[in-house]
Image (cartoon, rainbow, N blue to C red):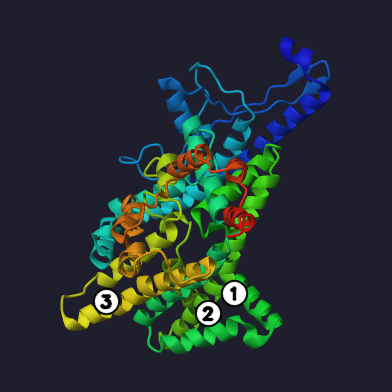
Amino acid sequence: MAVLNQHLTRADWVFVQGIWDTIQTLWPEIKNLERRLVGVPPPEIERRQVVTPHGTFEGGYFPVAFMSGTNLGAKIRDSELMPGASENTTKATTGHGWTNARTKVTGKIQLGIHIISSHLDQVILDLTHREAIHAADKLLRQTEVKTVMREILGDEFSYERYWRPWLKHLARDTSNTESLQAHEMFARKLRINYTVFKLGLRASTLIMQIAGHFNAFGLLRREIPHAAKYWVNALFEAGGKGSLAKAKEVYNLILLRSEVMRSRVIVGDRDLRDTVRDTKKMEFLGKNVSSAKFGRWALSLIAKIQLIFVDVPIFLAAEAAGKEEMGMTEAQAVIFAEGLVRRSQGSGNSMDLSSVQQGGAQGNEWMKAMTMFFSYNNTQGNQVLDSLQGKKFNIKDTGAFLADYSFFAIWPAAYAMAVHSVGRGRAADEDEPLDAQVRRQLVTLLLGDTLGAIPFARDAWPIMAGRSPRMSFAYKMFLDDLADLGHSKDELDTMFDIIRLGALAKGLPGEQIIDLTERTLRGE
């Protein structure tokens, strides 16, 4: 106390008391949750008054977080700050170490201010998720439910293979990153920054969102008759039939009746979701977030284009078809439409992410960095595999699969090539032999996007098309950019390489704009 009294002002002590009070506001909810789930409230740590030269303060509870690097520290850190520690033997649950009584265990404790945000983040996750996760887990564990789920959905959607991992992911689906090691934080930052740098303000990416209509129509035509009629009607309705005011009204009404659609801009993509979380955390800690906000806005622009021009028409078509063709109620049609949007366009929600996108059972950041720009291809790959289910090797089924495949892979790839050709100002490379052009285009159409759902294979398939490998790993791209800087052709090349690395380091968007500027200055 002598050291604290020597250095802390009254303003400092008021701030400390404010932190204690903020943490204390959650205690009644914690106590009620424990009483509902366990039967008895947890033991409360009594406040102790703190006497200082600036007055007597009421005191309060502050979470204990031990230093990592020892077994003791890792164990306590995992139980208090990292939820769902065991992935194989325990039921899904959120972390709630703050409900335990203090023990006589000793060790080096962390004193960083980040402990505050980590604790609040975990407590709020526990209060909002634990009861629902326990109820879902209890239901899905029932033998009868397991049997029915396996019989109807198949082994892929069994409790052990699908539902329990999903629930465990929900239990740790938090913005807390303080338990990450330095190298994992580097991988996370590199992944997010590269996503912002590569995709943000990229005109071709914005235009490419329209390709999602092919995938959605491919799904809708399999599930309802007269799909084209509903599709055309939805496009006119989403466009307000030529009236901007009417289009806004339609858009707002959809957001009112669908929670999934309201959250699409934020959770439609994993990396945008992580960017938003990290930015909000930096704001809470008082850090400069101007560049992070700009990067978030650039990614959000892509998501908004996707929502307005793709998701909304898809939703309207599926909702109308559900009510008129399938006899659904209003609520059922909304759920059906939400499902079609998620299944055709992908999502950053935990249920819609593959295990490798989630970083495996432990949320490994280096694994996540291997799956950049992965969501669309993963969604597309699932559509192709679903189309193969129950098909036989005969003319009828083969024709049906090829029709599906054209909407899921061929037409989107053809659209992408057309967009990129216009962007380059030519339809083909005049220096490339005709047979090589044909081979490259065919392989791209037939294999490119389908293999895009397979890590490593998605980066190696261009070799089959006579091109260099396309490495989509964040750390591989980083090393390539460093190598480019070391092999600059002239001063202009060096300058733009430095600009690219600077934008990447700050998480700023605009790679395509930088490239276009350099080409313009070179007169290309």
Identify whether 261 is placed above or below 2: below
Circle count:
3
List x then y, in percent, for residue 437: 35, 67
Per the image, the residue denoted by label 1 is 254
Distance CA(mark 2)–CA(mark 3): 26 Å
Circle 3 crowding by C-alpha within 10 Å: few under 14, some 14–19, many from 20? some
Q: Quadrant of residue 6?
A: top right
Image quarter hosting the C terminus? bottom right
Q: In this image, 303 relative to 461: left or right?
A: right
Hey, what amino acid is under mark 1? Ile
Q: In this image, 384 relative to 412: left or right?
A: left
The reply to whether callout 2 and callout 3 are in contact (CB within 8 Å) is no
Q: Which residue is at 53% across, 78% downward?
A: 313
Query: Between residues 396 and 145, which one lies in front from this camera angle?
Result: 396
Identify whether 98 is placed above or below 416: above
The label on residue 316 is: 2
Distance CA(mark 1)–CA(mark 2): 8 Å
List x then y, in percent, for residue 168: 40, 46
List x then y, in percent, for residue 199: 55, 56
The label on residue 401 is: 3
Q: In this image, 482 relative to 221: left or right?
A: right
Image quarter hosting the N terminus? top right
| Chain-order first, disc 1 or disc 3 | 1
Q: Which residue is at 26% across, 80% downward?
A: 400
Element assignment for label 3: helix
Circle 1 crowding by C-alpha within 10 Å: few under 14, some 14–19, many from 20? some
